[in-house]
């Protein structure tokens, strides 16, 4: 049986660390894991299945012999290094925004559009975290009832901005408790005890890039240019796991919420937590380190004929990033698609 | 000129304290302020305009000679004591949920439906905090473009649950920094670093009371039984000031967002903060102790013909509660409506 040499680019970052954890638990036939990171981290070590791996510098020469390269080191690193990795024969699974909307690059969520991965030319894009959890939750509903329009407001964790943002929230909280002045380091405003309606940069249409990612990526992944998505993305003082308040309107009539719960619970990657009489609904603090997309607060929207509300929570570093990337690798290996259409 | 004896029922609570602060700054002709609270707080003192006032027990006998009674001591206190206050000749402005949907009781936001206060029979209800800031922001748009449907997701501060919830978040944060286990006291789950899609109790339709308040109260205040409101109410770890992500659909076509900004900025009680290129938008941490309803992130919803998104923030203890109640008192005094239709 063939086994694979897998590089993790950005291995010491928030997502890269989770990629290593996810690879550890994966059934992938792994010959070797090669952790790559910025020059400054060269020589440091990361743990993998009880061994210590030495971090190498993510440079052009680092990709010789690599079969699969998982990238999570930002857009610039992906733009610079993934063509090199591809040229050296690797398939790149890229967690950055660099190639997601490139028509030649598949944008894949294995539970939603696995077939799209088959014809890659060397690069497969991993969608944005807030998009992934939304499409996993909505795919079974879209298949059955055809979603016309989504209005979504997000409650996003700071880990979406990486380790520095986690450290910054921690520091701000500490400064607050110690009565010190809070000086934000990562976001333009304090995040502790605040809600920032600002994720990624603002575009001319008044939306942020993050919001337009949810619009564009959802349409590409669902392969539906008619579906409408109206997002508002908000950062809140949560360390990990994104929450989303989602309102949908469908073309076909919706059944009783109990049937929706059943349908979602049977869907790949979804778990329903929805027993409100017992205060049971998905919560970010309980989702850390989990693999599923959790759905609750399922209820009819009585203001339109075919409307539904959902509260969707998932670990933004796992299913929103690292896990989805590893699942794409597993999909390629299982179907013998690693070499794609190159 | 007549001056008024004003009781504040629940004077030591989160809202009651703000009522005193707001009365201090008010132009109302005040003869005396009488702070009332639970028996346990009898004899304690509160500050008012540089003097110390002794807190009395909120009992049936406490309302003799009171002209205006501002209630913020919970539903049960309102149900028990406001009929007594009315019988003693006072007008009650009640911040609880006890009478809001009573057809005989006006539900008033002075910028929105001042005329409704005229025909009170002794009790005027102060709407729910999350409703007040939404209707203040939307009233000018409803007048001009007729709102058909609102989809709103809230980001609500813990102070909406009173002083114990403020203390609880504080303690949870402290315990986190000190590495201690967090034990929630007020909500069914930890609120620090979390997002709870649960405010007030759940009803049989799957919505919470808080969500149905937003639906029912908005229709009553706007006097429009056709307007549709689909709310999701969420508590986040913010001490003070509620934020709302609001999506509206109007009957009439909407102009360029610049014209909407102008219209809103000219409206009573509203201030637009919307310069995203300079990271300027309303934020809860900057709204504490302010009187306005702040609106930003104003942008067309491109998924429907007449759609708009807004981000609305206000101090839930001020405009969401204490200030609105005092403004109702001012409205009554100014128009000589204190005695109403009794």
Image (spheres, coloured by chain):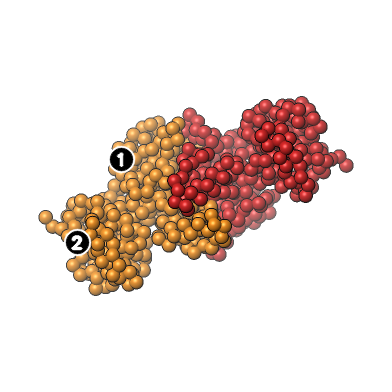
Chain colours: A red, B orange
Q: Is residue B131 visible?
A: no
Q: Which quadrant would the C terminus of chain B be assigned to in this image?
A: bottom left
Q: Which class describes the residues within 10 Å of circle 1: few (<14), some (14-19), or many (20+)?
A: some
**Residue matched to label 2:** B32
Q: Chain of mark 1?
A: B
Mark 1, secondary structure of its residue: loop
Q: Residue lying farthest right?
A: A1
Tell which of A267 and A242 is nearer to you: A242
Which chain's residue wears label 2? B
Residue sitting nearer the eye, B33 or B95: B33
Of discs 2 and 1, which sits in the foreground? 2
Q: Measuring 41% from the left and 33% from the top, which residue is drawn there? A: B275
Q: Which residue is mark 1?
A: B267
Residue at x-position 25% and y-position 58%: B48
Q: Quadrant of the N terminus of chain B?
A: bottom left
Instruction: Relative to A209, say whether B14 is above or below.
Output: below
Nearest the viewer among B4 and A36 is A36
Percent of width and height locating residue B192:
51, 55
Q: Is residue B75 visible?
A: yes
Mark 2 or 1, nearer chain start: 2
Find numbered disc 2 in the image and state the secondary structure of the residue it sits on. Answer: strand
């Amino acid at each position: 049986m063939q086994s694979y040499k897998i590089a993790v680019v950005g291995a010491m970052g928030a997502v890269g660390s989770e990629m290593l954890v996810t690879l550890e638990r994966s059934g992938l036939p792994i010959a070797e894991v090669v952790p790559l990171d910025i020059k400054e981290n060269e020589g440091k070590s990361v743990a993998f299945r009880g061994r210590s791996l030495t971090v190498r510098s993510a440079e052009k020469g680092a990709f010789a012999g690599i079969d699969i390269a998982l990238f999570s080191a930002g857009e610039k690193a992906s733009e610079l290094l993934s063509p090199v990795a591809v040229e050296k024969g690797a398939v790149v699974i890229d967690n950055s925004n660099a190639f997601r909307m490139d028509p030649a690059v598949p944008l894949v969520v294995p539970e939603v559009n696995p077939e799209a991965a088959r014809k890659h030319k060397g690069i497969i894009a991993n969608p944005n975290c807030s998009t992934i959890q939304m499409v996993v939750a909505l795919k079974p509903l879209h298949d059955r009832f055809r979603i016309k329009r989504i209005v979504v407001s997000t409650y996003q964790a700071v880990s979406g901005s990486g380790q520095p943002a986690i450290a910054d929230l921690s520091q701000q909280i500490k400064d607050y408790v110690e009565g010190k002045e809070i000086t934000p380091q990562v976001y333009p405003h304090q995040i502790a005890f605040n809600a920032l309606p600002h994720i990624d940069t603002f575009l001319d249409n008044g939306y942020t890039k993050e919001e337009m990612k949810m619009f564009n990526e959802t349409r590409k992944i669902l392969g539906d240019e008619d579906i409408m998505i109206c997002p508002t993305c908000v950062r809140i003082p949560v360390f990990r796991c994104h929450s989303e308040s989602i309102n949908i309107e469908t073309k076909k009539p919706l059944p009783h919420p109990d049937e929706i719960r059943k349908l979602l619970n049977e869907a790949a990657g979804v778990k329903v937590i929805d027993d409100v009489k017992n205060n049971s609904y998905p919560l970010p603090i309980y989702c850390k380190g989990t693999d599923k997309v959790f759905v609750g607060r399922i209820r009819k929207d009585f203001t339109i004929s075919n409307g539904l509300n959902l509260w969707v929570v998932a670990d933004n570093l796992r299913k929103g990033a690292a896990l989805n990337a590893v699942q794409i690798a597993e999909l390629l290996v299982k179907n013998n698609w690693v070499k794609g259409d190159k």
